Image (cartoon, coloured by chain):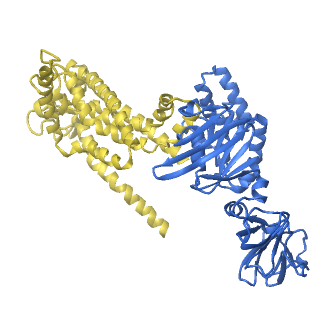
Chain colours: A yellow, B blue
Amino acid sequence: MILKSTKFGKRLVTAVPAFWLLLFFAVPFLIVFKISFSWMQPVQPGYAPLFEWIEETGRLVASLNFANYVTVLQDPLYLGTFPYSVKVAAISTILCLLVGFPMAYAIARSRPSTRNLLLMLIILPFWTSFLLRVYAWIGLLKSNGVINNTLLALGVIDQPLTLLYTDFAVYVGIVYSYLPFMILPLYANLEKHDLTLLEAASDLGASPTTAFFRITLPLSMPGVVAGCLLVFIPAVGEFVIPSLLGRTDQLMIGTVLSAQFFGARNWPVASAVAIVLLLLLLLPILLFQRYQQRELEAAKR
Amino acid sequence: MHEYVRLEGVSKRFGEFVAVDNVSLSIDRGEIFCLLGGSGCGKTTLLRMLAGFEAPSGGRILIDGQDMAGTPPYERPVNMMFQSYALFPHMTVAGNVAFGLEQEGLPKAEIERRVGEMLDIVKLGEFARRKPHQLSGGQRQRVALARALVKRPKLLLLDEPLGALDKKLREHTQFELVNLQQQLGVTFIVVTHDQEEAMTLASRIGVMNKGQIVQVGTPTDIYEFPNSRFVADFIGSVNMFEGKLIEDEPGHVRIRCPELEHVVYVSHGISASPEATVSVAIRPEKMEVTRADPGSSENRTQGTVQDIAYMGDMSVYLVRLPSGRVLRVTLPNIERHADERIVRGESVYLSWQPSSPVVLTG
């Protein structure tokens, strides 16, 4: 009886998130997938139905449109955005890691009383609007903005630097916005490290630098992987930051996507872009899953 | 014997707390020296200072004549075996053992050869490719030992080396450890709270209490000639009586203890002021339990057997004296048949030799 009820309970517990995912991920995904194969039409709902029942012949006619994918994969406008987006996301992720690792390390090694305060400070920016924070960077980066004015006043430069609407501005925006997603998993990992391992390394003749690269860094890999994916995946599809701070001659995939959906109202092509983007991100996600699985198995033993 | 480690008035304070208090010690090459004490007595702090993880607040540490002040752990000719073993979880057994040699920048072939040799010595050759989490506790202990010994240190520090092992494995490992130590000629400094471990491993024991070393000696010295009530009580079990010195001669003393109805006669002199209050300590195995009156007029008492604990090789008798005091006496079980044995509730006489009691003034 008890066994039966716990089994039921287990099913119930997994059913809730499963239902959630079905309703808010699988169903919308299938809708997007369907739209990506349809024809654009000027009247509502903006795309033609895939399947149509023809009364006269009594047949079900399916009209699939692969042209959307052809467009996405052939048109240089789209094609160029994929590698560019991946490049921007990858560089931003590496920058996040380089900035975030020392911060996470410092927090994890600080006294427990100051630790919570530092973590609070990391999370604090989330309390204001994301959009507002990105807008604020415009004020900082523009040619008569805070940074340029300060540098000019100090005499470091005599011409304002072009900071806004560059790749640099996008990196700054992404690193700034996504840094907590890098720091938090890294901190969670580093905080658990057994410090006697470092003593053991030191005892065996390893200098602190060697001990860091041979002990701390390999042991923090799960945190590094988690943090990188948490930054990389949303960064590839990011559209607010590049459209506010980025170049105008080279778009990111997210910007194109939103332009197609909301500007051109070409839902089929936009859907095709979304599907290709998803396929592009599937690889790192699968890699992450396999990594997590391995970690989980190692931890079980 | 050649002095290898020398501590001169070493102290360690953490804020107000004095963890190690003015310890001076000299340890010879090839010794197994045990630091024995309860938790918080400062023994681990002392070990960590030797390894270089803590800097002394005062005093000097010399290893092979070299003052270790300012020498970081990774430059000391010392290796440590950690209580938790501290094996690197992301490296194989061979990787763990090789780590220390890699830091010395030895050629790959040499490292491989020495790791192989060391793993054979600790009988882990076939486990070289395993990760630490795939090993049993005893195997992990041996990896930790191999990892520390492969560097051929002159001095190995061991923090509760057998603490995490079960009783059977412990006994076995104890003897292995001593064999290995003699084979390699390394000086061992072992920290333990387990007196049995200290007794079997050590060539000398330093008993610690409240940050100080209260007695240093061979296991026999410590057990048979404790120099204080603390040591007598801490090592093994003991029956201790308060008493007054009533006769103080160079060759013998007589002590009257309120809890015993007869005078205690001790066949060696002590240094104490006359009429001084002293403690008399008698080990449980040095008392005799008899049904018949021992006949002497001193070193005897009477009581009732309150309880018997049968341990197989010996039995522990708890004997209640008329004064209400309960004494502990152990007798080896020489006879297999239990007919002749004293049973619970019997009236018995307890007696001991004049050489058995230890008189403690400290």
Position of A182 with respect to B33 (left or right) is left
Residue B306 sits in which quadrant? Answer: bottom right
Position of A166 with respect to B15 (left or right) is left
Answer above or below: position of B61 versus B113.
below
Answer above or below: position of A60 versus B268.
above
Which residue is nearer to you in this view: A131 or A203?
A203
Which residue is nearer to you in this view: B83 or B20?
B20
Residue shown at 27% from the left, 50% from the top:
A23
Q: Position of residue B237 (x, y in %)?
A: 73, 65
Answer above or below: position of A11 versus B63.
below
Q: Position of residue B235 (x, y in %)?
A: 71, 60
Which residue is nearer to you in this view: B166 or A81?
B166
Position of A131 with respect to A95 (left or right) is left
Residue shown at 24% from the left, 36% from the top:
A177
Q: Position of residue B259 (x, y in %)?
A: 73, 79
Q: Position of residue A78 (x, y in %)?
A: 22, 23
Residue B309 sits in which quadrant? Answer: bottom right
Answer above or below: position of A93 versus A157.
below
